[in-house]
Amino acid sequence: MPVGGELTLDGLLDIMAGRNLPLAINVKADGMALALKKTFARYGHTNWFVFDMAVPDMRSYLIEEVITYSRLSDVEPSPAWLERATGVWLDGFDSEWFSNQVIGDLLSQDKQVCVVSPELHGRDCMALWQQLLEFRSENRLTLCTDTPVDAAIFFK
């Protein structure tokens, strides 16, 4: 919960000025699609996507043509609006339940895939990272991790 003094989106985009690095926006409130779209446009930042919004609110992001990822997880086995989503946020809350076949199937549907690394849920990441080596040259697959430097070295 915000307590005051948090970095704003404008503040973050000011820091990132001129560097169109990827940003995954974890949506935690409804009704923000147009405001987010306008803010990113104002800064000229085009390398971003949204995920994790309420399923009914996802519709507004799709209508606004915001790059939207639908969640596929051990808790949510049927991604909402998969046919309209640009990508899939692939998560394992309790285990690494998905195989490389699942990832390959999503990629074959022309979806971007962002895999949530297990350390974000308090588990060791090495087994999954080893599994993902098969896709290290696949530019439509990304990894959400708390240890990006370690991941960059591992997947080199």
Image (cartoon, rainbow, N blue to C red):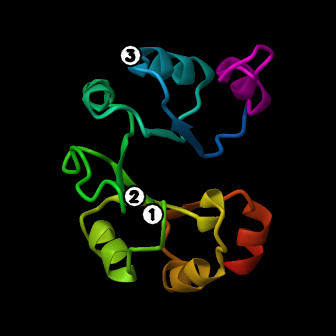
Residue 10 is covered by the magenta coloring:
yes
Q: Residues within 10 Å of mark 2 (few under 14, many from 20)?
A: many
Upstream in the sequence, badge 1 or badge 3?
Answer: 3
**Disc on res. 112:** 2
At 24% across and 64% down in the image, what residue appears? 109
Mark pair 2, 3: CA separation = 24 Å
Q: Secondary structure at mark 1?
A: loop
Where is residue 45 drawn, in percent x and y? 59, 31
Q: Secondary structure at mark 3?
A: loop
At 19% across and 50% down in the image, what residue appears? 83
Mark pair 2, 1: CA separation = 5 Å
Residue stretch rendered in magenta on the structure:
1-17
Residue 118 location, quadrant: bottom right
At 73% across and 70% down in the image, what residue appears? 152
As rendered, which of 125 and 150 lies closer to the eye? 125
- Callout count: 3
Residue farthest toward the front in the current orientation of the protein: 94
Q: To which residue does mark 1 refer?
A: 140
Horizontal side of residue 75 vs 1, given as left or right: left
Q: Secondary structure at mark 2?
A: strand
**Disc on res. 31:** 3
Q: Are marks 2 and 1 in contact (CB under 8 Å)?
A: yes
Quadrant in which the N terminus is drawn: top right
Q: In front: mark 2 or mark 3?
A: 3
Where is residue 99 drawn, in percent x and y? 38, 80
